[in-house]
Amino acid sequence: MNWTSLINFDLLTFILSSIVSAGFSCAVWLLKTHSEKKITAKIEHEFNQKLEDHKAKLKKI
């Protein structure tokens, strides 16, 4: 049995699995960040809408 080919195969498997794992982690982080930005934008929009409504009510008084 040739141990060098076995070691190289294990090393190659480890490197490839590390790359896939890092890529998956990056994808999850990007999705999370994108979701947080969408939620933040929605909250800001609702806040600005309520602020404008409140300003309009104050102008009527």
Image (cartoon, rainbow, N blue to C red):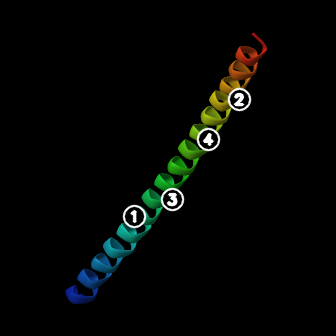
Tag 2 residue: 49
Q: Tag 3, which secondary structure?
A: helix
Residue, far top: 61
Amino acid beneath label 4 = Ala
Amino acid beneath label 2 = Gln
Tag 1 residue: 22
> Where is the N terminus found, in terms of image quarters?
bottom left
Mark 2 or 4, nearer chain start: 4
Residue, far left: 3
Q: Tag 2, which secondary structure?
A: helix
Residue, far right: 60
Q: Which mark is residue 41?
A: 4
Mark 3 → mark 4, Cα distance in angstroms? 21 Å
Asked whether 33 or 12 is in front, the reply is: 33
Name the front one of labels 2 and 3: 2
Mark 4 or 1, nearer chain start: 1
Mark 1 → mark 3, Cα distance in angstroms? 9 Å
Q: Picture coordinates of residue 52 (x, y %)?
A: 70, 27
Name the front one of labels 2 and 4: 2
Q: Which mark is residue 27?
A: 3
Name the front one of labels 2 and 1: 2
Question: Can you tell which quarter of the image residue 9 is in?
Answer: bottom left
Asked whether 1 or 27 is in front, the reply is: 27
Mark 2 → mark 1, Cα distance in angstroms? 40 Å
